[in-house]
Image: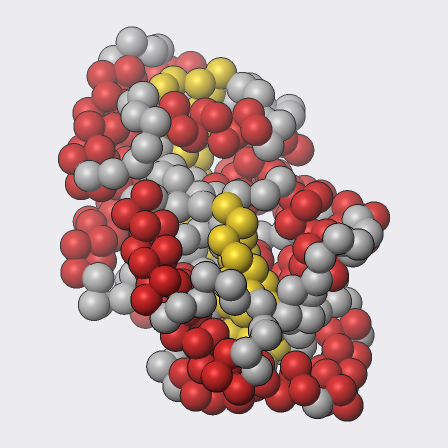
């Protein structure tokens, strides 16, 4: 199995996490992973030890277009050194070009290799460059991939409308380690009024979050928000500047990347989870928060209607005041908080990583039957 995690930047995305957790469980395959130095470290930190072809060695991710071109070229150079006739399966962990083009190159050399392609969401038109790059990927994937795995039914319908073969598209969402989460105790040291957990990227709504929390603190000055996650340095610097611009340095704590046990412990001890992302394929962080038993407030994205039927409060995108009002209501109205919390506790979780990995194995095995 040749896997391509060649688009990894900084901060664990849901797609990266999904791949690592599934690959750890599908140990019947001999994995060879094309990725960067940062990607190799992310895999090893989460317990995925494999054979790696390292494409670039930067210690910080920046200059996106240049870095992605460099990774594509390096991957193609590495491919020349391998016997592609021995490749049984190709596995592209995203639809970004550094993960698609090398897989396509091997597929052209070995038509018998089965290509598994993951697609998580359609990039909005407003992000012109990545949207254009995705269109190129879609042209290649549509014709040459053998299996396309998506994480929600809404996306599957969108791809079929764009001419993808519905017979190739299969649904298999991300998961969480439910038993692991159940075994972690709430933090005894600290409890936050709200927590964000995810990549530090504008598409995740991190700058919306600062504006929202400013409004919350105007009503309840002692409120404290924790932001857990990592990302590119330029986004972290801008986030810090925004926090200081609004005089929120005592109200917003930037905790950086935390290991799972610490992050889950903080989620369990806090009052609610905020996730104002502007684009998602699924939302693993939301699933984790719900498993921790705390209310979740999000922007109302179409995908959430297909994935989360209860337990989350959805707000029209851009309505900062309404988002603020919902937070304030949960912080000050104990009866409302109990009502929403009961809804969360009644959710039945089936998205365990073991189940997801078994389904992935079944989908891949069907390619050779």
Instruction: Determine whether, in the image, residue 6 is placed left or right of residue 258.
Output: left
| Residue that appears at 22% across and 53% down | 130
| Residue that appears at 35% across and 11% down | 83
**Relative height, residue 148 to residue 77 (above, below):** below
| Residue that appears at 76% across and 87% down | 334
Residue 108 x, y percent position in the rendering: 26, 28
Q: What sort of colour scheme is used for the picture?
A: secondary structure
Residue 136 x, y percent position in the rendering: 19, 49
| Residue that appears at 53% across and 43% down | 257
What count of labels does the image hold?
A: 0
Instruction: Determine whether, in the image, residue 368 is placed left or right of residue 279.
Output: right
The foreground one among 250 and 350 is 250
Residue 95, visible in the rendered structure: no
Residue 10 x, y percent position in the rendering: 39, 40
Instruction: Determine whether, in the image, residue 71 is placed left or right of residue 354.
Output: left
The quarter of the displayed image where residue 296 is located: bottom right
Instruction: Determine whether, in the image, residue 80 is placed left or right of residue 15.
Output: left
Looking at the rendered image, the quarter that the C terminus falls into is top right
Residue 38, visible in the rendered structure: yes
The quarter of the displayed image where residue 297 is located: bottom right
**Relative height, residue 332 to residue 93 (above, below):** below
Residue 87 x, y percent position in the rendering: 42, 20
**Relative height, residue 287 to residue 175 (above, below):** below
The quarter of the displayed image where residue 310 is located: bottom right
């Amino acid at each position: 199995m040749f896997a391509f995690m060649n688009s990894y930047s900084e901060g664990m995305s849901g797609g990266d996490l999904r791949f690592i957790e599934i690959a750890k469980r599908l140990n019947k395959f001999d994995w060879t992973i094309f990725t960067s130095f940062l990607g190799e470290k992310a895999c090893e930190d989460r317990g995925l030890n494999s054979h790696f072809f390292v494409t670039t060695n930067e210690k910080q991710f920046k200059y996106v277009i240049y870095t992605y071109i460099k990774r594509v070229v390096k991957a193609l150079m590495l491919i020349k050194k391998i016997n592609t006739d021995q490749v049984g399966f190709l596995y592209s962990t995203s639809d970004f070009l550094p993960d698609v083009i090398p897989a396509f190159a091997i597929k052209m050399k070995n038509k018998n290799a089965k290509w598994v392609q993951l697609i998580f969401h359609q990039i909005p038109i407003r992000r012109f460059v990545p949207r254009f790059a995705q269109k190129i990927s879609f042209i290649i994937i549509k014709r040459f991939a053998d299996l396309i795995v998506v994480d929600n039914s809404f996306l599957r319908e969108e791809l079929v409308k764009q001419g993808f073969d519905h017979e190739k598209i299969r649904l298999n969402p991300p998961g969480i380690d439910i038993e692991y989460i159940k075994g972690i105790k709430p933090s005894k040291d600290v409890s936050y009024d709200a927590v964000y957990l995810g990549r530090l990227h504008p598409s995740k709504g991190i700058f919306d979050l600062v504006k929202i929390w400013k409004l919350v603190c105007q009503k309840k000055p002692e409120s404290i928000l924790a932001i857990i996650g990592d990302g590119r340095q330029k986004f972290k610097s801008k986030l810090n500047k925004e926090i200081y611009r609004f005089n929120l340095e005592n109200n917003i704590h930037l905790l950086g990347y935390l290991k799972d046990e610490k992050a889950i412990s903080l989620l369990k001890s806090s009052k609610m989870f905020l996730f104002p992302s502007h684009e998602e394929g699924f939302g693993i962080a939301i699933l984790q928060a719900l498993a921790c038993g705390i209310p979740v407030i999000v922007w109302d994205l179409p995908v959430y209607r297909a994935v989360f039927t209860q337990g989350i409060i959805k707000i029209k995108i851009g309505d900062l005041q309404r988002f603020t009002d919902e937070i304030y209501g949960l912080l000050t109205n104990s009866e409302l908080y109990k009502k929403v919390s009961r809804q969360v506790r009644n959710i039945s979780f089936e998205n365990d990583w073991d189940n997801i990995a078994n389904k992935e194995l079944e989908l891949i095995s069907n390619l050779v039957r």
